[in-house]
Amino acid sequence: MPSVTDEPTNSTIEGKIIWHDLLSDTPAESKIFYNELFGWQFEDVALKTGLFQSINYTLIRHNGKLIGGMVDQTHLETKEDISQWVVLLSVKDIDAAVASFTAQNGTVFAPPTDLADRGKIAIVADPQGALLGLLQTKDGDPLDEQEVDVGGFLWNELWTRDVSEATKFYSRIAQYDAEDRIINKADNSKQNYRLLKTNNTPRAGILTNPVEDLSPTWVSYIRVKNAESLDAIVARVEELGGAILLAPQDRAIGGRVALIAGPSGAGIALQTWSGKPKLTKQ
Amino acid sequence: MLIISKLLKVVVFILIGFGLCSCNNNSNVYASVGVSTGFSSYHHGHRGHGSGPRMRGSISVGGRIR
């Protein structure tokens, strides 16, 4: 399995979400969907499966940069529909991280598994049921960018039932510092938004699950240039086989967001973002 | 004896082949996820809803902040 970076970085940024895998039962339609909406390019990887070469993993690039991968779910021996985006969290010691998941009543679906150049991966769920992957890279993690490209992954957020419990849980996996921001909503009410930070750099948000009938999950946001382009993207979702899960809406602190699903049902959020994200270098 | 020898070669060949099966294949780790969660669970229970927004809720406080 290829590395998550084109060139070795030899840097581990524990607690950073460094990769996104799309599990899709409609890989051909998914390629068209994301290419049309965000300009992503797809690069099939030939993998040895026994005596044969099989293509069931595809690298995703945006503006030439690696941003994720896609797994053809139809090749998996699973009866359940597991189509979704999976975030992969960087850890320095995957055995210790998995042990922490087990000790804290998390679920380990796949124990640490060696994926050659990629490093070691484990597939787990936190105690509230949110699925994610842990990755101990072999050649290092993608370095922090000063600016995320339009069409790239901008942010990751955990939608959960109990924010405090989730904070405690993940802070034992990586050395996160929690920071709360109070957001003034349009109806003059206030809502808390929790940031998980490492080395004073925001890595993810935690939010009480804001939608009905959805079990706890990690949600990734794609950067969109402005409100007009966000609305234009959402307008094309259904013709490309996707679904609008939450229509475009203004954010309480400015900007615009929407929640959509690709042809396989994997949900992903869109967010307008202008200017350079405020990042602290490692 | 010749037939047994050939059969043994075939068996060894197959075993080596299967030995390679579990190596370096990212998809194998996801096969272990035997339950629908998050959006996959929602999608499974809400297929065929037609067009238009399908969830109830708001993410006006969600997303990256500076």
Image: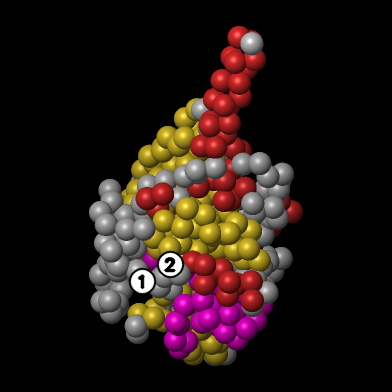
Residue A155, image quadrant: bottom left
Write down the quadrant of residue A208 in the picture: bottom right
Mark 1: which secondary structure?
loop
Q: Are marks 1 and 2 on the same chain?
A: yes
Task: Give the residues in magenta.
Answer: A154-179
Which residue is nearer to you in this view: B17 or A248?
Answer: B17
Q: Residue furthest right?
A: B45
> x, y (%) of residue A3?
36, 52
Q: Nearer the viewer, residue A134 or A250?
A: A134
Q: Is residue A179 visible?
A: yes
Distance in Å between CA atoms under marks 1 and 2: 6 Å
Quadrant in which residue B45 is drawn: bottom right
Closer to us: A130 or A230? A130
Q: Residue drawn 47% across and 87% down?
A: A178
* Residue to which mark 2 is pinned: A90
The amino acid sitting under disc 1 is: Ile
Q: Residue at x 50, y 43 (%)?
A: B23
- Reading the image, the residue beneath label 1 is A13
Q: Amino acid at mark 2?
A: Ser
Q: Magenta stretch: residue A178 in it?
A: yes
